[in-house]
Amino acid sequence: IVPINASLVIGPLAATLEGYGNWGWTQAPYTGGDGTALKWFGPVGQPMLIHKTWFGGGAKNIRFIGNPTTPPSAAILLTTGIPITVLDSRGDFENIWIGDSNIQFQNGIMFVGVSNGDTHSFRGITIGGCSGYGILNQNSDANIISFDGLIINNVPVGVWTAASMSFR
């Protein structure tokens, strides 16, 4: 388990944050697996990972563990950034585990901004333990987002989106 106390940022150049996903037992106290897990010790309301790149990057084989005392706003935040010239497109996320049966996050995956933010792909995603949304897409221009293999549990609202998304 890797402790983090501030948001990790991918961008403006593309990069992929990659671990290995042998998490073992995924309920507290998280024993039995030796896979890559990030655990939040930062302030309430900040995202754990911010993705703001043009054409590429993402995350693979990582478990996000929030904090019930200071829950992050999201495990992953995809943003077109400020100023608006910072675009966000073509992110690739694979084998991501967010939370568990306990409330640790405000939201699982969030999309924010007003322009672009599209063409992201997600494969093998599990989201649990959020007080708000599993997936929250507030960017009406964040289209062509695909999920292949998505599990959401223990979340009041699974998906809310202002743009098109596909699920398989």
Image (cartoon, rainbow, N blue to C red):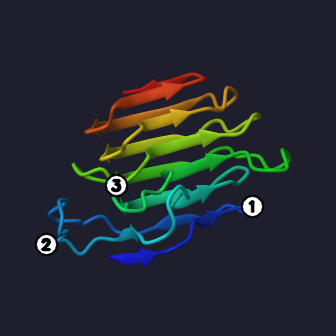
Residue 115 in the figure: left or right of residue 14? right
Nearer to us in this view, 131 or 12: 131
State if disc 3 and disc 1 touch (CB < 8 Å).
Answer: no
For numbered disc 3, what is the local secondary structure?
Answer: loop
Asked which secondary structure carries label 2, the reply is loop
Mark 1: which amino acid?
A: Pro
For disc 1, the marked residue is: 12
Mark yes or no: residue 57 visible: no
Does residue 158 sit above or below 111 in this rendering?
above
Among the two numbered marks 1 and 3 on one chain, the one whose residue lies closer to the N terminus: 1
Q: Which quadrant would residue 97 be assigned to in this image? A: bottom left
Estimate the x, y position of residue 84 in percent, counting from the top left. Answer: 84, 44
Horizontal and vertical percent position of residue 5: 50, 74
Which image quadrant for residue 163?
top right
Q: Are marks 3 and 2 in contact (CB under 8 Å)?
A: no
| Quadrant of the image occupied by residue 153 | top left
**Mark closer to the chain start, 1 or 2:** 1
Circle 1 SS class? loop
116 vs 43, nearest the viewer? 43
The residue at the point 43 percent across, 47 percent down is: 106
Q: Which mark is residue 32?
A: 2
Neighbours of disc 3 within 10 Å: few (<14), some (14-19), many (20+):
many
Q: Give how far apart the Cα atoms at labels 1 and 2 are.
A: 36 Å
Q: Is residue 48 above or below residue 3?
A: above
The residue that appears at 85% across and 50% down in the rendered structure is 83
Residue 104, disc: 3
Q: Which quadrant is the C terminus positioned in?
A: top left
Disc 1 and disc 2 in contact, CB within 8 angstroms: no
| Amino acid tagged 3 | Gln
Q: State which mark lies toward you, 1 or 3.
A: 3
Q: Could you tell whether 159 is left or right of 102 in the image? A: right
Three-letter code, disc 2: Gly
